[in-house]
Image (cartoon, helix red, strand yellow):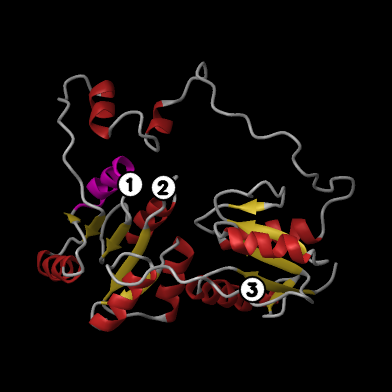
Amino acid sequence: MPLQYTVALVGFPPAEVTTLSSFFRMAARRPPAYVVQDEPRTADLLLVNADHPRAIGAVRRAALPAKVMLIGQADGGTGWPLQSRPVRLVPLLGAMDAVMNPPPDLEPEPETQPPREFASTDVMSPREFVNTDVMPPQALQSRFHPQSRVMPEVPRGEALLVAQSLVEGRILLKRFRQYGLDMDWCREPQQAQTMMAAHPYRLVVIDRVQGEPDGLALCRMAKQRKPQTPVVVMFATTVGSMERMKAGLAGADAYLSRSVSEGELQRLLVRHDLAEEGGFQATNFGEF
């Protein structure tokens, strides 16, 4: 087995490129090492953002000799190996090893049949209902706790703020509302978990959270929401490299200090199409 492979990251936003590159550098002592490079033509492995159709299309048209692994929600019919978000980097290394050095007589074959759809006669466990819109959390509570009462659904906004501090929560709520965002505010992490499961928020803002689940766990839960995955912004009093990496591993799109400037905050919202002006910019992948 070679001691080192080169990897090109295709179609990822800058924050994910930074997180992945930092992790591969830290894991370089573990053989085989993976070294990130900008040039996909000579890379041994291409890690491709499966949630960006242009990136997948560019790789398919280029027909490069490198092996390919996707990171995202679906493989787009390519049959390439897929790792879902949020990314767990240690299992990702094992999956990359399997792609680069598959076991004998176990070469991966492209899937010839589409995955089985959920049949109407299948029985889902109660736990599975939590991630669907079939039944609201209040109804679930009433079903398994007969003495509880079913409360009517409350209209929800497009964004959720999770902040336990009354003072800091009011400040963050005011800052985000000035951009026209209809914000819900929750001070209890368990309640925030229920609200995220019941409503497809476009944005989830997480301040420092103590208790269970903590802020990183809430971030992972938000990023597992399908089919609409929200943008997650995490705040902290200090922003160190280790804390930023933990947030990136949990799937956070941004990890900011509370003293972040309004200009930087506005650019972040515009970049994710959450502010009135601007929108998503077409990613420049370069030419293969």
- Of marks 3 and 2, the one in the foreground: 2
Q: Pinpoint residue 12: horizontal percent, then vertical percent.
A: 55, 69
Residue occupied by mark 1: 200
- Of marks 1 and 2, the one in the foreground: 1
Q: Is residue 4 left or right of residue 11?
A: right
Mark 1 or mark 2, earlier in chain:
1
Q: Quadrant of residue 215?
A: bottom left
Give the residue at x 84% y 48%.
107
Q: Pinpoint residue 142: horizontal percent, then vertical percent.
A: 23, 24
Viewer-proximal residue, 209 or 269? 269
Residue farthest right in this picture: 105
Q: Is residue 173 left or right of residue 267?
A: left
Give the residue at x 74% y 40%.
111
CA gap between label 1 and label 3 equals 36 Å
Question: Which kind of residue does numbered mark 2 sit on?
Answer: Arg
Q: Is residue 202 left or right of residue 21?
A: left
Question: Which kind of residue does numbered mark 3 sit on?
Answer: Ala
CA gap between label 3 and label 2 equals 29 Å
Magenta region, residue range: 188-200
Dot 1 crowding, Cα within 10 Å, few <14, some 14–19, many 20+: many
Magenta span: predominant SS is helix
Viewer-proximal residue, 127 or 129? 129
Mark 1 or mark 3, earlier in chain:
3
Number of numbered markers: 3
CA gap between label 1 and label 2 equals 8 Å
Mark 1: secondary structure: loop
Q: Which mark is residue 225?
A: 2
Viewer-proximal residue, 98 or 54? 54
Residue occupied by mark 3: 27
Q: Quadrant of the C terminus?
A: bottom right
